[in-house]
Image (cartoon, rainbow, N blue to C red):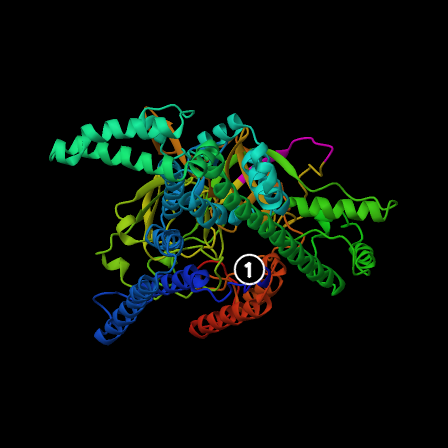
Amino acid sequence: MGISWWRLAFIFGPALARGDISSFGLYTPFIFGYLLSRVVKSAKNRTKLRGYPNKIPATDAQKWRGKLQWNVAQVFGFLGVCHYLKAETRSLFNFFLSSFVNPMLRFLLPQRNKGPLMRGKPLWDTTWGNSAVHCMILGGLGLSWWFYGIDHLFLGFLFLQAIPELQKRFWMKPMQHICLVGGILVVCFPFFSVGLMAWYFPSYLESLPKPYLQSLCWLANARPHITDYYSVLGVSPDADMKTIKKVFREQAIDLHPDKVGDDPVKLARFHAIQEASDALTKGRAEYDKSIENQELNEMVPRCYAFLIMMGYWLLHSLIDWNDVEGMRDQHKDQLRNYILADHPLDMKALGLQDDEEAGKMYLQQYCESEDVELPVCTNGDPEEIHFMRTLITDTFPGLKLKPYPKVKGKIDNLLQEIALGSKDKGENIKEINPNAGFYNGYTIKVELLPANTKKTEKVEKPERGSDESDDESEEDESKIKNQTDETTIYEYIGGDKRIAILQPPLKFRPIAGKSRFTLSKPGVSKTITALCGRLGWSGVNQVFKIGDGEVNEEFDWKLHEEEGYYNGYMFEVKENDTFIGNGRIHEYWPTSRKIILQDPLHMTSGKELKGLRYTDAEIKVVAGMTYSIYPDSLIPHRKRVYNEGTNGPSHAQVASHAIATPKNIIQAPKGAGVAAQRNVKKKMSRMSAINKKQKGGGGCVCM
């Protein structure tokens, strides 16, 4: 986000007005936090040393340790300077937690932590590091309130740790953020009101009723600590000075050290009555005033600090609102320029597919003005499409849009496609019959070869062509040993691709060159054994046969007969109202009602209650579950193109996808253009390296 000059003004502006801008104590927390962040950065750099501590040069390890030790020494040196100058250091503990402990917990505990499922969605989905930080914050708030009340330690946990976490969650929701701050101000209005009166109307503080202040002290756990000297001496608050001196003299004679000797109880009692006598005889007027308003004296500084902190939070939320609105305006301008440049849009989702040229003219006519309202493009939100459709119908009342293309129905079958034979290995590939339907009804047994088998000799893996391309990922061999499954070939496509459709699917995804299949059939004596080839969609839960759409006049609910009509759309699976998983459609075949996803279905995961403990939920897709197909972005998703012998898309596909993908329309507020260009260059350079290793072009999807 860069430097926020508004925030710096809010921090240092009041100090400048008070004239203590040069005070060392003002800068102490920020310097301490900066030094701690350097230590954290140095500690995290260890992960960049591959194979630490055994497989790196000793000079690199020594250099890293030396830098870390130097940064730690700077922190202790700064603390020594603060001690020498007697600077205010009460807030440094919270800065230590927020600048060092929290980031290190997140760094050391990156594992996912998912809560119990509610309608297929986990109640929380975070890391164990974040969970530890949140528990520490809640525990710090509770303990600091219990021992110190609403004091500087409690306010430090609240405004240096808890509120920044809330700001992260509400960053793109400024209105909800403002409502949250306003709600807290309403709930805490009693404290807020005392702080306001102390700032603007201090003369009215005396008029606050005592029961009101006592209740605030109870809520703030701020018990008055002024000793009741009248009760110590055993006299009435209305007693005159003569009576007080007489009572003190009588007790002092009995408790004098010369008389009681070394008795610690009586000596402590003597010092207590002596302190009480001095307070009541030398400064009784001031003492009577302080004991009369002790609740007020306790609450005023606390409420004043609370008022200042809440004011900062409110101002920061307004600044965030302004930043988010500016970012949204920037995104809208980018979408407007995208439309005016005649870049591709999903005209089917907008209902303008009958005459796309005329539809583009309508959109460009709408975007001619610079202050037009446009949706904020997010990667995967159907609401942006509905909002754009509403804008079009409001601007052009005579224009009738086609219904939103959403289809909902039942899953008929779960399928799996694999390639029979690997050209890399060339084992028995000539024995595989390429005629379509030849192996229909055959039994196929697939096993993952152990790591120590000769068949698993190392094959050079092509580099990734895209961060999104995780198809045919090589699994850890320690996790794929001794996996064997058997099923039936539902349909054999054959041809050069030698694709077999399995039903039911296997329990695992065959790994090209590391999975061996055996074909057999009753009555056929000859069996065929070979290695599985490479196929972009051979995963489990990646190929589905779907039923007809359910009637819904609000949407375009009938399945279209155009091949590839739903390519790039979202495919979502539910069981009743419970979310199961989703994925993006790679290919749609209307004749066979078959859907192929780009990647295996992204299944939901979480915990469920079994007996008296939470365990990982067992979720699987079965026939009869409900599917939904719908567009979720104004910018059409590009279809993947697989080159022979590579796991990733083609070189041209990566370049076009990196430039025109929806997520690049949505850029960060600052520096996003440079970052996007850098990402494109990296992806294109990776694909150049892949293409150099290939022996020829081609668009074959298997080998």
Does residue 593 appear in the picture of this structure? no
Q: Give the range drawn in magenta.
A: 545-554
Near-viewer residue (464 or 231): 231
Where residue 299 sits: x, y (%)?
A: 48, 38
Magenta-colored stretch includes residue 547: yes
Where residue 34 sits: x, y (%)?
A: 41, 64
Crowdedness near tag 1: few (<14), some (14–19) or many (≥20) residues, C-alpha within 10 Å: few
Question: In the visual, does 325 lie left or right of 126?
Answer: right
Q: Residue at the location (49% across, 64% down)?
A: 643
Near-viewer residue (632 or 198): 198
- For mark 1, give the secondary structure: helix
Does residue 414 appear in the picture of this structure? yes
Question: In the visual, does 372 lie left or right of 148?
Answer: right
Position of 383 relative to 117 (above/below): below
Q: Residue at the location (43% across, 24% down)?
A: 238
Where residue 554 sits: x, y (%)?
A: 73, 34
Q: Residue under circle 1?
A: 18
Where residue 29 sits: x, y (%)?
A: 42, 59
